[in-house]
Image: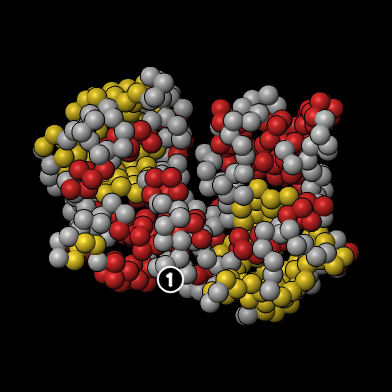
Amino acid sequence: MAAVESSGRQEIAAPASASLAIELRGISKAFGPVQANKDISIQVAKGSIHGIIGENGAGKSTLMSILYGFYKADAGEIYISGNLTPIPDSQSAIRAGIGMVFQHFKLVQNFTVLENVILGAEGGALLRGAMAKARKSLADLAREYELDVDPDAVVEDLSVGHQQRVEILKALYRQADILILDEPTGVLTPAEADQLFRILNGLRDQGKTVILITHKLREIMEITDTVSVMRRGQMTATVKTADTSPEELAELMVGRKVLLSVEKAPATPGEMVLEVEGLRVRDDAGVERLKGVSLTIRAGEILGIAGVAGNGQSELLEVLAGIARGEGTVRLNGQEIALNATADGQSRRARGIAHVPEDRQHLGLIMDFSAWENVAFGYHHAPEYQRSGLLMDNDAIRADTVDKMERYDVRPPIPTLASKNFSGGNQQKLVVAREMDRNPELLLVGQPTRGVDIGAIEFIHKQIVALRDAGKAVLLVSVELDEIMSLSDRIAVMFDGRIMGERDPKITNERELGLLMAGVVK
């Protein structure tokens, strides 16, 4: 395939239009003063997996939302299989053979799989025949694409990975030939992500076209045929994946060289900060989620908690943050803290505990509130936010938000913008800025870089290490094993609500940790 020179980078030449599934020409989109997409052109070959990467706020999701009819472009044209195709709404996109799986699934939780798949495509008022037809179609699709899901299962009872399969089945049921996936592994375990990749390879082998929006360079290198890079609303390069490297892609994304590994000096642990002994937690149904967990963290060290999601890590963070109730003993700087009904997040913050929750949208932010309101969330009684000790000083909060947005590179830097209108990664930066900037004695951080781009990952990792080097204690929970191994000074592995063992990251490996994560102890 011939190559053309663009922006100092050898790029692959576009294939002939007859072999294109999608061609976008000169797409532009602005939201008020913010130019989300600027004169973007991109070509996607039929029967390929095409990656789109870029920093948070680079305009990736906006571009795909235009292709799927969620937004209308201010300028530009869309061609599907060589034909000019106006897409004013999502129904037009579906008729054009386009399906989209969003980062946050669009499923009715108390409906069955079959009901979710048929929803919006019932084909008439009489459902019995449509349901029978859908059931057979679902079985055929599941068999063909290895998307086995019980059609009668209620969605809220399914794992996140199986819910994602339902979203893919919805698109295929509507006869999609082009499938767009927005950050599809952000909520998956490593094993679920591997299974998703096998499914996507199968879709490509069957002639489907897949567009994968992600910030994870490992995924891009592992599964895509071609990758396009966006930066600040513009397309900077399109290259064959086999002809590039993670380092080059990171530099194209950010506009500078990026450290892909964490640089930190050896820890120098000090006084004991956190002591947990025999901690037990039951959920609302009475099921024991933590089964006698014990651990310690000293000042100046990071304890990483590894494990497959759903093995008690979330409950551990929530009880330490005062969100959930538990039994046992927890001491902070030698003084016991409450685990009963008197515990709450405010009392924890007063003791010097900061919390970056795993689920930013449900526990970290009030989505309809503006950025500046969320920056004060939980800290609105802080002296610097008060006027005469009685009223909140909104001007001071807004000024502080502007400062945090600049230092943490939150895009767009508009403090009055509702939090729901930021990308997922920029929502994460808001939470991280609010909690880490408080210089806590103990930082509880869950999935700190979930849905965050490569430049922001580097920045957040540096902030976590800086807190450790300032003599603070950090409890880190992450499903990303490479993140746990590179950031942690000690690693504890959780399985089924228990600590299975503790390992030194310098002498362990992913295989040993993986066995512990599966409950296998030598």
Question: Does residue 68 sit above or below 506 in this rendering?
Answer: below
Q: Could you tell me residue 498's position as x and y percent?
A: 34, 25
Which of the pair 133/182 is nearer the observer?
133
Label 1, on which residue? 413
Which of the pair 371/332 is nearer the observer?
371
The quadrant of the image that shows the C terminus is: top left
Check disc 1: other Cα within 10 Å, few if <14, some if 14-19, many if 20+. Answer: some
Image quadrant in which you'd find residue 128: top right
Question: Does residue 123 sit above or below 282 in this rendering?
Answer: below
Horizontal side of residue 222 vs 401, given as left or right: right
Q: Could you tell me residue 374's position as x and y percent?
A: 36, 57
Image quadrant in which you'd find residue 60: bottom right
Question: Identity of the amino acid at label 1?
Answer: Pro
Question: Does residue 97 sit above or below 144 in this rendering?
Answer: below
Residue drawn at x 51%, y 74% as measured from the top left: 255
Residue drawn at x 22%, y 25% as measured from the top left: 328
